[in-house]
C-alpha cells in the first residue's frame, strides 16, 4: 500500500502550526502588562482625574505592571470603573504591545441643583455629585425641588439645547410653590414666567418674536416680568 506523502506532510505541517500557535498563546498570556494608559473621551472638563482612575485600578488589582495578561478580566475592570459616580461609560482593552488602555467617558452636568441637598443634574436627568476637581458652568436650579419638578426642569433644559440663544442665555430656573417655572437670563433683567412645561415650542416661539421686536424698539429694559403662561400670547409687566 503506497503512502500518500502529500497528506502526511500536510498533517505534520498542520501539527507544527497548531503547536506554534498554542505556544504563542501561552507565552502571550503570561506576558506582563507593560503600562496603563488612561484616556478621557468627550467633554474635556475633568470631574475626575487620571490619578483617580489609576487609584481605583491599584485598589482592585495592585500594580498592574506586574500582572500577567491572563489575570486581566477586561469586562470586570470596565464595570468597576463605571461604578464611579462620575463615569458614564468605560472601555478597556489590551494592545498588541501589552499596553492596557482605559477609555473613560464622564457624565455631563447640565444644571446645578441648590435644594436641601446640592448636586448636578446630568444629561440623562439623573443626580450627579459635585466634583472637587472642576465646577461646571451650568444653569442654577432653585425653589421647590422634588422629583416631579426636576423632571420638568430637565424637559426645559433639553428643549433649550435645540436653540442656541436659549442655551447661551438661560442661567437659572426657579420653581415656585405653585409649580411655575421662572427663567433667569444672562443679560436681561426681566424674569420669564414660563408657567408649566406644556407647549414649550409654542411658548418659546412667542418669546423669540417678542424679544426680536423689543430689542429693535430698545424696550427690553422696561420690563420686570415676561409671562408665557397664557395661551398663545406674551404678557409683560413693566418696571
Image (cartoon, rainbow, N blue to C red):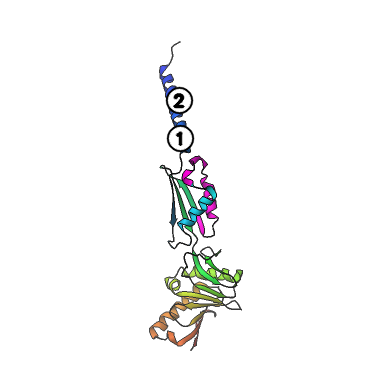
Counting from the top left corner in percent of width and height, residue 153 is at: 54, 71
Mark 2 element type: helix
At x 47%, y 31%, the residue is 22
Please state which of residues 190 and 40 is positioned toward the viewer in this rendering: 40
Residue that lies at the very extreme toward the left in this rendered image: 216
Q: Indicate yes or no whether the magenta region holds residue 95.
A: no
At x 46%, y 51%, the residue is 102
Please state which of residues 158 and 87 is positioned toward the viewer in this rendering: 87
At x 43%, y 19%, the residue is 8
Mark 1 element type: helix
Counting from the top left corner in percent of width and height, residue 164 is at: 42, 70
Counting from the top left corner in percent of width and height, residue 81 is at: 52, 53
Q: Look at the numbered discs 1 and 2 and tell me whether their residues touch, using CB distance below 8 Å.
A: no
Mark 1 burial class by Cα count in 10 Å: few <14, some 14-19, many 20+ = few
Q: Quadrant of residue 129?
A: bottom right
Q: Quadrant of residue 145?
A: bottom right
Q: Quadrant of residue 44?
A: bottom left
| 193, above or below 85, in the image | below
Mark 2 burial class by Cα count in 10 Å: few <14, some 14-19, many 20+ = few
Please state which of residues 125 and 89 is positioned toward the viewer in this rendering: 89
Which is closer to the viewer, label 1 or label 2? 1
Q: Indicate yes or no whether the magenta region holds residue 79.
A: yes
Picture disc at residue 15? 2
Q: Label 1, label 2: how many angstroms apart (C-alpha)?
A: 18 Å
User: For mark 1, what is the residue?
Assistant: 27
Q: Earlier in the sequence, mark 1 or mark 2?
A: 2
Counting from the top left corner in percent of width and height, residue 107 is at: 50, 61
Q: Which residues are magenta?
A: 64-89
Amino acid at each position: 500500500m503506497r503512502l500518500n506523502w502529500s497528506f502526511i506532510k500536510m498533517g505534520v505541517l498542520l501539527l507544527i502550526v497548531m503547536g506554534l500557535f498554542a505556544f504563542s498563546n501561552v507565552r502571550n498570556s503570561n506576558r506582563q502588562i507593560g503600562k496603563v494608559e488612561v484616556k478621557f473621551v468627550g467633554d474635556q472638563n475633568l470631574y475626575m482625574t487620571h490619578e483617580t482612575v489609576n487609584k481605583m485600578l491599584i485598589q482592585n488589582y495592585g500594580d498592574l505592571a506586574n500582572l500577567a495578561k491572563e489575570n486581566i478580566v477586561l469586562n470586570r475592570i470596565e464595570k468597576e470603573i463605571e461604578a464611579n459616580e462620575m463615569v458614564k461609560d468605560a472601555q478597556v482593552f489590551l494592545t498588541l504591545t501589552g499596553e492596557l488602555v482605559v477609555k473613560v467617558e464622564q457624565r455631563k452636568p447640565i444644571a446645578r441643583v441648590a435644594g436641601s441637598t446640592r448636586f448636578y443634574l446630568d444629561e440623562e436627568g439623573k443626580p450627579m455629585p459635585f466634583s472637587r476637581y472642576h465646577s461646571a458652568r451650568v444653569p442654577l436650579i432653585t425653589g421647590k425641588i422634588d422629583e416631579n419638578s426636576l423632571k420638568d426642569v430637565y424637559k426645559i433644559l433639553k428643549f433649550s439645547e435645540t436653540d442656541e440663544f436659549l442655551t447661551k442665555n438661560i442661567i437659572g430656573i426657579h420653581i415656585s410653590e405653585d409649580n411655575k417655572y421662572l427663567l433667569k437670563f444672562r443679560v436681561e433683567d426681566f424674569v420669564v414666567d414660563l408657567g408649566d412645561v406644556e407647549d414649550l415650542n409654542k411658548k418659546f416661539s412667542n418669546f423669540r418674536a417678542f424679544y426680536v421686536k423689543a430689542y429693535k424698539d430698545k424696550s427690553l429694559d422696561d420690563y420686570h416680568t415676561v409671562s408665557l403662561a397664557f395661551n398663545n400670547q406674551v404678557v409683560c409687566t413693566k418696571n
